[in-house]
């Protein structure tokens, strides 16, 4: 049988294109397999399950059979491409220019476009001079954290006869006005100053008393997320039903006991300071790692290939739920972040491959035991929950990165400050 033909048509750092031709014989085999699969489970009038003639099944489920056969052929073609070409794909390939003339009985042709890990070489990975700076935790930071805890515990109390201020919780109704018609009144509950409403609406609300209704014309700001509305004026009717304000609890021993297992306010202050100091340590380590990667990148002139950067931007946009009309703006703003991420990943992956620094199964098990012990649950249960949430690989990746940075930092001089 003639094999699937794969031919590399284009290549650049971070991407490759492959032309694929699936011969007629394999196309027919894939169609026959798909037909048999549908025949086994098809229920057609006048026939028992699995007993309908193949010709009738092909006619009844033509599109579904064609789709299944095509998926099988693409899967087989990708296996053939990986076996033939020295590729290191970073994601599944994209299929372009698919051609399959069913009636003509010819081959299936298409192109694979795939992002791949480029070849890089790191000639210098050590002998850098780095500084690890841990800023001191100030009393103002401790007080700010205590205030945040008070706000979390503070009840919302109705306010009568006063105009709302920033941080007040308001219940409003906003309707659109067209001439003398008032349409589509919608209730909203929002905290002033959190950006839930456009600035001009919040300004109007802060000029009203509970129970008041006003007609106003407001304008969407120039940085409004929906581009079509930027700068547009809107006539509205605004009604303020209720204002609530938080009453912060006293910062005393009773509050400390309410927050958690603290005997006194001093014990709570100590715990808050320790948490802030640990966070400062983590941030110092993160800055140290960023500085180290940047020095390695500069010393070895590591580039961020365009296809991988574009993929990283796309992944970030999906994660942040960026709407279609803001993708171009987001891509432009986020590109430097994506480029830095790509360069970092290339350096770390090179270190893992060339220095054997991948986390072992034993190291992963040990970390699972450690985390499970802190949480008071069996390690097997933790592993199962992480696998179900598809987060076990993230934990493994984190362990691998720890090994890489431990090795890299041992090759350089780190000054503490």
Image (cartoon, helix red, strand yellow):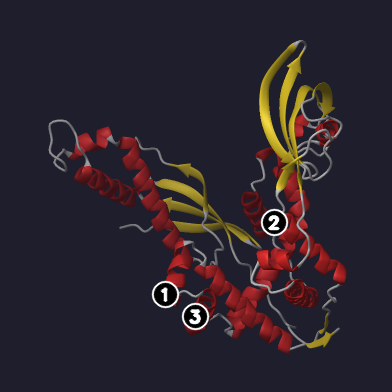
- Vertical comparison of 206 with 95: above or below: above
Single out the residue that lies furthest toward the top. Answer: 180
Give how far across and how far down residue 347 sits, in percent.
68, 74
Single out the residue that lies furthest toward the front. Answer: 254
Determine whether the residue tagged by mark 1 lies in a helix, strand or loop.
helix
Residue 122 or residue 290, whichever sits in front? 290
Mark 1 vs mark 3, CA separation in Å:
9 Å
Q: Can you see residue 26?
A: yes
Q: Which of marks 2 and 1 is in front?
A: 2
Give how far across and how far down residue 261 sits, in percent.
64, 72
Neighbours of disc 1 within 10 Å: few (<14), some (14-19), many (20+): few
The answer to which image quadrant residue 291 occupies is bottom right
Mark 2 vs mark 1, CA separation in Å:
36 Å
Residue 135 or residue 203, whichever sits in front? 203
Q: Can you see residue 86?
A: no
Residue 291 or residue 384, whichever sits in front? 384
Which one is earlier in the sequence, the residue at label 1 or at label 3? 3
Say which quadrant the N terminus sits in: bottom left
Give how far across and how far down residue 182 sits, in percent.
72, 16
Left or right, 206 with respect to 2, comes to: right
Give how far across and how far down residue 176 sits, in percent.
73, 21
Q: Mark 2 points at which residue?
A: 153
Which one is earlier in the sequence, the residue at label 2 or at label 3? 2
Determine whether the residue tagged by mark 3 lies in a helix, strand or loop.
helix
Q: Mark 3 points at which residue?
A: 369
Residue 410 or residue 356, whichever sits in front? 410
Neighbours of disc 2 within 10 Å: few (<14), some (14-19), many (20+): some
- Vertical comparison of 260 with 191: above or below: below
Q: Mark 1 points at which residue?
A: 380
* CB atoms of marks 1 and 3 within 8 Å: no
Numbered badge on residue 152: none
* CB atoms of marks 2 and 3 within 8 Å: no
């Amino acid at each position: 049988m003639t094999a699937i033909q794969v031919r590399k048509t284009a290549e650049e750092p971070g991407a490759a294109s492959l032309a694929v031709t699936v011969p007629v014989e394999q196309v027919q085999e894939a169609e026959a397999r798909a037909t048999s699969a549908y025949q086994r489970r098809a229920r057609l009038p006048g026939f028992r399950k699995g007993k309908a003639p193949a010709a009738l099944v092909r006619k009844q489920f033509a599109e579904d059979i064609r789709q299944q056969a095509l998926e099988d052929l693409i899967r087989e073609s990708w296996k053939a491409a990986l076996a033939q070409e020295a590729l290191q794909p970073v994601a599944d390939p994209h299929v372009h220019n698919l051609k399959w003339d069913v009636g003509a009985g010819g081959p299936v042709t298409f192109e694979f476009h795939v992002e791949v890990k480029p070849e890089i070489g790191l000639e210098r990975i050590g002998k850098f001079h780095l500084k690890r700076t841990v800023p001191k935790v100030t009393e103002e930071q401790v007080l700010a954290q205590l205030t945040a805890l008070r706000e979390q515990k503070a009840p919302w109390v109705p306010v009568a006869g006063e105009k709302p201020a920033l941080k007040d919780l308001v219940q409003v109704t906003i309707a659109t006005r067209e001439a003398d018609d008032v349409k589509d009144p919608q209730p909203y509950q929002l905290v002033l100053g959190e950006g839930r409403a456009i600035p001009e609406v919040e300004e109007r609300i802060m000029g009203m008393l509970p129970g008041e209704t006003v007609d106003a014309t407001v304008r969407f700001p120039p940085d409004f997320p929906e581009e079509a509305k930027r700068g547009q004026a809107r006539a509205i009717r605004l009604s303020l039903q209720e204002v609530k304000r938080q009453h912060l609890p006293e910062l005393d021993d009773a509050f400390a006991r309410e927050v958690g297992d603290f005997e006194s306010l001093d014990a709570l202050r100590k715990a808050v300071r320790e948490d802030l100091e640990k966070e400062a340590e983590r941030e110092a380590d993160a800055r140290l790692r960023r500085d180290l990667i940047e020095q390695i990148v500069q010393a070895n002139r590591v580039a961020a290939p365009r296809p991988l950067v574009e993929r990283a931007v796309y992944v970030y946009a999906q994660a942040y739920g960026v709407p279609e009309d803001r993708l171009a703006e987001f891509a432009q703003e986020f590109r430097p972040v994506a480029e830095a991420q790509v360069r970092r990943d290339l350096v770390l992956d090179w270190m893992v491959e060339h220095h054997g620094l991948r986390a072992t199964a034993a190291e992963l098990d040990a970390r699972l035991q450690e985390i499970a012990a802190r949480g008071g649950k069996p390690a097997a249960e933790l592993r199962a929950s992480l696998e179900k949430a598809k987060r076990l690989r993230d934990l493994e990746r984190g362990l691998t990165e720890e090994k890489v940075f431990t090795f890299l930092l041992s090759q350089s001089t780190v000054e503490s400050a």
